[in-house]
Image: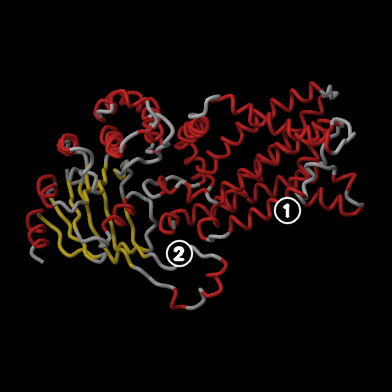
Amino acid sequence: MVRRFVKDMKRYIPYVLYASKSDLKSEVANSHLNWLWWILDPLCFMLVYIFIALVVFRRTTPYFPVFVFSGLIIWYFFSRNIRASVTMVRSNKSIIKKIYVPKHVLILENMLVQLFKFLVSCGLLIVLIIIYQVPLGLNILYVFPVFIVILMLTYGLACILMHFGVFVEDISNIINVLLRLMMYLSGIFYSIRDRVPEPYNMILLRGNPMAFCMDAVRSALLEQKAPDFLVLGIWFAIGLLLCLIGLKLIYKYENSYAKVI
Amino acid sequence: MTETAIQVKDLYISYRNLNRVSIKKLRRSSNPKDMRVFGAINGISLEVKRGEIVGLIGRNGSGKTTLLRAMAGIFAPNSGTINTYGNTISLLSIGVGFQSKLSGRENIFLSGLLLGYSEAMIREKLDEIIEFSELGDFIDMPVQTYSSGMYSKLAFSITAIMEPDIMLVDEVLSVGDAKFKKKSYNKMMELIADHSRTVIIVSHSADVLRKLCNRAIWINKGKIVKQGDVNEVMEAYENQ
């Protein structure tokens, strides 16, 4: 299966790259500000959250805007990919009914689109870090292993959900509710560590991969701390397992997708 | 010339209980009455030699399109095998993977890459495709501004010019205006004249099949009724 995956990747990578580029382009093709939207969009929601944080909640937590924004962009990357994956096959009906493509290619394409947006947001985060003069050290490099874990988890989960999304009609409603629940349990707007009472905060931080990843990124950025490598390793293994299960499901059933949609 | 290009053996394809379920439906689906089995292809075996032009005829719903899709690798057969001996195979159909907000030129690349050609190869053929499609300056306009005729012309041009080893043609010879129809028909003839290319055509037009094909296969209810010389099969089909 892994060999087949590598072979598929070799053949379809040019398509994935070109298609995600076209996706991005077509999103802004008819608007007046054109590619500026790629920056304006995250910039606007960043400003909204800074306003809420500083004016409405009057939070005095140090570097609170950086805290919120770093969590938020990770959450957006994850949730947008997951939400899109459920309807992925149906929304690419025109392709799937006419030609064979390995269906995981569709997931990858969407992920690249989201990754691009994520990177633009990261640029804004860096600007924010400079404005708020967050002291940085080499510990900032810890965000990279954490991000790899996020990628694995997102890809694996997206593959599995894409498969079930084909056969179960109302899975997208269920996923929407679950994602909302997960969002509030991930501590985007509050620190789980300080605000949730004793035994539950650690359970939440370890058991919810998004809460764990956000917390790890924030402690690397704001507190110069290394992540908990044991927990990180466990989530990496789970991510890898999810990817394998997802790919296996897709390879086994992908040729019946066209019959169902 | 007697090399086999496609071999289909005992092919069965059915659409059994693969309808989407929702939670509400799931409760009832244990009822066996709901599981309708619809056999689209019921045991077809056929062989197509390299360079042959085969016509598929049959009434609506007889399984022609399903057979083509199975050959193109879109459907998995329930049982039986399809061997295409490593040939590049392409189902000639309208607008594979078009992005309606992008220009025709970008869509040529998108579609070509999806069909498995390299970017360099597409660039090489780009001018030829644009010229054949007769779109002129429209090629740099978004595809959503195209008329349906222009859209089909572009789609046809891409597959016709990229020239796969095996072409599966599903009713697309009725594309565009009379002039373009004639041109696409001529292009088909030209492609067919190249004896290394294998073509399978689905059409309801007896004229087209008689002119293009050297062999015909008549399918009804997922089974082969008659196959052989195109004139004989067409006669039997018309006299049924």
Q: Name the spot of residue A73 as percent of width and height, x first.
A: 70, 36
Q: Chain of mark 2?
A: B
Count of labels in the image: 2
User: What residue type is disc 1 on?
Assistant: Leu
Q: Are marks 2 and 1 in contact (CB under 8 Å)?
A: no
Q: Is residue B101 left or right of residue B4?
A: right
In front of the other: A20 or B175: B175
Residue under the image location 49 percent in, 36 percent down: A16
The quadrant the C terminus of chain A occupies is bottom left
Compared to residue A63, the image places residue B94 above or below, namely below
Q: Secondary structure at mark 2?
A: loop
What residue is rendered at 36% in x and 65% in y? B14
Q: Is residue B7 left or right of residue B208?
A: right
Is residue B164 in view from this perspective? no
Residue assigned mark 2: B19
Q: Residue furthest right?
A: A198
Q: Are marks 2 and 1 on the same chain?
A: no
Q: Dot 1 falls on which chain?
A: A
**Residue B10 location in percent, x, y?**
29, 63
Q: Residue A124: give its label.
A: none
Q: In this rendering, would B58 be left or right of A250?
A: left
Q: Which residue is mark 1?
A: A181
Q: Circle 2: is it few (<14), some (14-19), or many (20+) Cα within 10 Å? A: some
Q: Residue at x 49, y 45 (%)?
A: A4
Report the amino acid beneath label 2.
Answer: Asn
| Mark 2 or mark 1, whichever is nearer to me | 1
